[in-house]
Amino acid sequence: MKLGGLSILRDISLRVDKGEIVCVLGANGVGKTTLMRTLSGIYHPAKGSIILDGQPIHRLPAHAIVRLGLAQAPEGRQIFPTMTVEENLILGGIQQGKHSRERERVLSLFPLLKERLKQKAGSLSGGEQQMLCIGRALMGRPRILLLDEPSLGLAPRLVQQIFELLQHIRRQGIAILLVEQNARAALKISHRAYVVEGGRISLSGAAADLAGDERVRRAYLGERRAETSRGDMLSPTAASSYRRSSVSSR
């Protein structure tokens, strides 16, 4: 993936299957948000392909990808603040032509939003805005939900609520690809995980295994020893060499 002539992502390969949560970990600036925007069609890869249920989607516009069942809740929430909660939700389902039918399902997940349907979205608390952002993405009834930093700026109590909701969404059969700085919470609810460094995948595996990996614990879980040197960190040179990124809802 290139932006402005610079290669941001290289040799990325990942998989998301139906009904599972997969998290992507990495420091700021390594390409996690670029990855999400590429999967959702905002950017297009210079090489390789993105496959959704056997169909290449990497040259499709974002609105066509939404119709195929892949929706994104972006970093920073990016709701429409001057519109009501209800209007934001309606916009989320407009590509699929699903309004009232999906609205009740979303509001059952987020009862606080039901109490604030006529309220301007910009007047909601940070946690409520994040719920609206996720609810808006769910209005199209996606098979795969892309979540970019859903816990950003939220109090610990609200973070716990958001992550509990993600598990409930997953149990409905919706696959979730999660980019999250709160590595401990993300690994706890995920089935599998990928670590991105320098635009490449440097480590991947079962989330429980990565949570117990000493390198991950030091780099991302705040358990770094005082004597840890740069050489103890995950190395980009250990990146796996792949050519295809795939998203699957099998």
Image (tube, helix red, strand yellow):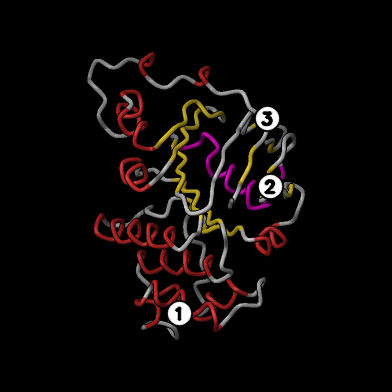
Instruction: Indicate the secondary structure of the residue bearing disc 2.
Output: loop
Residue depicted at 74% across the width and 36% down the height? 46
Extent of the magenta region? 28-44
Using the image as rendered, state which of residue 120 and residue 207 is in the foreground.
Answer: 207
Report the amino acid beneath label 1. Lys
Percent position (x, y) of residue 208? 34, 36
Q: Secondary structure at mark 3?
A: loop
Residue beneath disc 1: 120
Checking the image for residue 173, the label placed there is none
The amino acid on which the numbered mark 3 sits, given as a three-letter code, is Arg
Identify which residue is drawn at 61% across, 46% down: 247
Amino acid residing under circle 2: Tyr
Residue 59 is situated, as x and y percent measured from the top left of the image, at 77, 48
Whole-number angstrom distance, CA of label 1 to CA of label 2: 30 Å
Residue occupied by mark 2: 43
Q: Residue 204 appears at what percent x and percent y? A: 47, 31
What number is the disc on residue 243? 3
Q: Is residue 178 above or below residue 201?
A: below
Q: Residue furthest right?
A: 59
* 2 vs 3, front mark: 3
Q: Position of residue 235 (x, y in %)?
A: 46, 19
Q: Is residue 129 left or right of residue 140?
A: left
CA–CA distance in space, label 3 to label 1: 44 Å
